[in-house]
Image: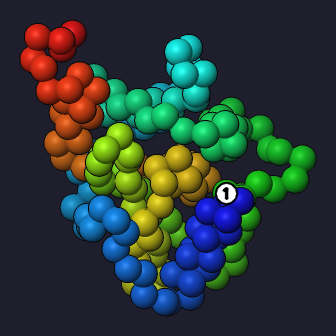
């Protein structure tokens, strides 16, 4: 709950023109990378955790990102055009940014470190843009609500595969 309030607060501050600092990954979303789409939500049978599957638009690579159930629900409801009975946190964030005449220009999954993915939301308002550090699941849910493009930083598909198999070439499928 606290993380969601922090995201909403950051979006609100950025939309009104406050400066946003770089997150833990320190990466900039200025160079967007490889455009992707949300292929869908799956359930990892071993961990019983939801996984959002990103798929590159001009290729066949896929990037699985493990997420929480509330974020999976928020992403799935937007993919399936199902409105919840009451607005969720991502719907609220969209209303706040809309109300301040801003938009989400794009979302970039920027980094993977120690099994944790990082993302940046690029907000635009009156010709200015600011970047906000976010969990990929929140960033993706918001991008879907704004119909904003999604990107994966160049090289991240390969790094994700290396981290998944521990860098052992013989284990790769």
Label 1: element kind: helix
The image shows residue 29 at horizontal and vertical percentages of 29, 64
Which quadrant does the C terminus fall into?
top left
The image shows residue 12 at horizontal and vertical percentages of 61, 79
Residue 104, relative to residue 17: is it above or below?
above
Q: Nearer the viewer, residue 145 or 4?
A: 4
Residue 96, relative to residue 173: is it above or below?
below
Snapshot quadrant of residue 30: bottom left
Query: Mark 1 packing: few (<14 Cα in 10 Å), some, or many (20+)?
Result: many
The image shows residue 133 at horizontal and vertical percentages of 43, 66
Q: Is residue 41 visible?
A: no
Marks counted in the figure total 1
The image shows residue 64 at horizontal and vertical percentages of 41, 30
Q: Nearer the viewer, residue 91 or 127?
A: 91
Which residue is denoted by mark 1 in the rendering? 90
**Horizontally, is 113 left or right of 172 in the view?**
right
Snapshot quadrant of residue 160: top left
> Which residue occupies 61% across, 53% down?
145
Which quadrant does the N terminus fall into?
bottom right
**Horizontally, is 68 left or right of 32 in the view?**
right
- What kind of colouring is applied to the model shown? rainbow
**Horizontally, is 1 left or right of 28 in the view?**
right
Residue 43, relative to residue 104: is it above or below?
above
> Which residue occupies 56% across, 14% down?
45
Q: Residue furthest left?
A: 169
Q: Is residue 52 visible?
A: yes
Residue 35, relative to residue 65: is it above or below?
below
> Which residue occupies 23% across, 22% down?
165
> Which residue occupies 39% across, 62% down?
120
């Amino acid at each position: 709950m606290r993380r969601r309030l922090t995201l909403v607060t950051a979006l609100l501050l950025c939309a009104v023109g406050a400066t946003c600092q770089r997150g833990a990954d320190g990466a900039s979303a200025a160079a967007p990378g490889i455009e992707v789409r949300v292929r869908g939500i799956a359930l990892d049978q071993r961990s019983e955790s939801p996984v959002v599957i990103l798929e590159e638009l001009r290729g066949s690579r896929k990037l699985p990102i493990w997420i929480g159930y509330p974020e999976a629900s928020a992403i799935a409801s937007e993919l399936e055009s199902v409105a919840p009975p009451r607005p969720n946190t991502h719907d609220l964030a969209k209303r706040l940014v809309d109300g301040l005449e801003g938009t989400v220009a794009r979302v970039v999954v920027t980094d993977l470190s120690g099994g944790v993915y990082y993302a940046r939301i690029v907000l635009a308002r009156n010709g200015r843009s600011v970047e906000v550090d976010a969990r990929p699941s929140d960033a993706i849910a918001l991008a879907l609500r704004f119909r904003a493009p999604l990107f994966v930083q160049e090289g991240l598909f390969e790094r994700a595969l290396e981290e998944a198999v521990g860098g052992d070439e013989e284990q790769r499928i």
